[in-house]
Amino acid sequence: MIRDGKKTGGGRRQIVSAALLLTVALFFLPALVVWGEPVYQRSEVGDLPGGESALPINRTPSVMTTGTRDKGRAVRLQTKEGEVVELTMEEYLWGVVAAEMPASFEEEALKAQACAARTYTVIRQNSGSEKHPDADICGDSTCCQAYIERSAAEARWGLNAGEYGEKIDRAVAATDGLGILYEGKPIQALFFSSAAGKTVDAVEVWGNSVDYLKSVDSPEGDEVPNYRTQVVLGAEEVRSLTLNAYPGADLSGDPSGWFGEASRNDGGGVISILLGGVTLTGGQARSLFSLRSATFTVTWDGAQFTFDVTGYGHGVGMSQYGANAMAKSGSSFEDILTWYYTGAQVGELW
């Protein structure tokens, strides 16, 4: 080796050292290549002895596999602001599940919610609505289903945004294109928040009997936030609300006699109740006095009426907190759906 026109004394030593390093590298190269190979990226798992069981137990795919059915179906959504936007079913369902069910729930419950929401959406797409003729569905829960944009949901979740968002991603992807069918057709997949021990037969709420919307046991209880609530109203408030809605009611006597004995279902929900001589359904009384459910009792203490209420929602179909309780006990989303929708099956919607 020549540097600045002179031979260096360490030239021979460096040449020998380089040769030794090259020899060692060539000797160990095959082992380095084999040991460093990411086995889980092989395209043919069958090449490995024992197949899938031979894969490393810490295998963690970097990309979640999703289906294609939801991605290939469009949904026209009318937002709360009145704008009509087009989303894929996958995008839309993420926003519905995030808006309709607590993301802290078990994943099997979230999957059940995704299936129910997907089924409800398909029904809406097939039937249309005069309230939003240019859209398949709207984001108003009093008309269709609630919906929230991903950015708004993540802002609401704060530090849990990543975890919760990924849970809903998995729930939607794991149920790609699946819905709830009765005799091969999509059902009216109604759902609500929490029941007081039993769901309600559709005939009690709307007067129409539906084979798959029957009363079933529901396992949630006092772990549900605001499971038991009270509404307190004065006599004049009750009189005013009642006469505005039902002018024929007779509320001229002592308030202690305004309400008659209620007829109740097996879960304690009010089927019907007399008020000033007018027979109201439990649902009508719930709406009239802004109660969280039709499972209530009413008492008069000489100064005011107290409504003691259990649960939240109309009570028909799938209870969301009941679904979560079932998931915690080991039930799959299929178990949950076929329990709450009597005689129904889980299958592909398209």
Image: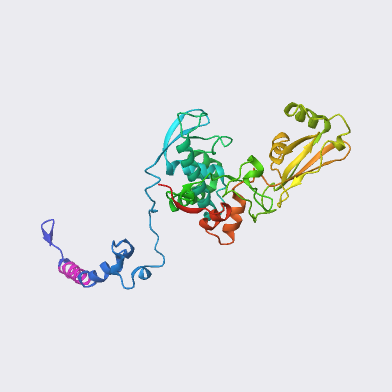
Q: Position of residue 46 (x, y in %)?
A: 30, 68
Q: Nearer the viewer, residue 103 or 350?
A: 350
Q: Nearer the viewer, residue 19 or 243?
A: 243
The magenta stretch spans residue 134: no
* Quadrant the N terminus occupies: bottom left
What colouring does the structure picture have? rainbow
Residue 196 falls left or right of residue 44: right
Q: Is residue 231 visible?
A: no
Residue at 73%, 50% (x, y): give it.
268
Residue 317 falls left or right of residue 123: right
Residue at 55%, 44% (x, y): give it.
157
Q: What predominant SS class does the magenta segment belong to?
A: helix
Q: Position of residue 142 (x, y in %)?
A: 59, 35
Residue 310 falls left or right of residue 318: right
Q: How many marks?
A: 0
Which region of the structure is painted magenta?
A: 12-24
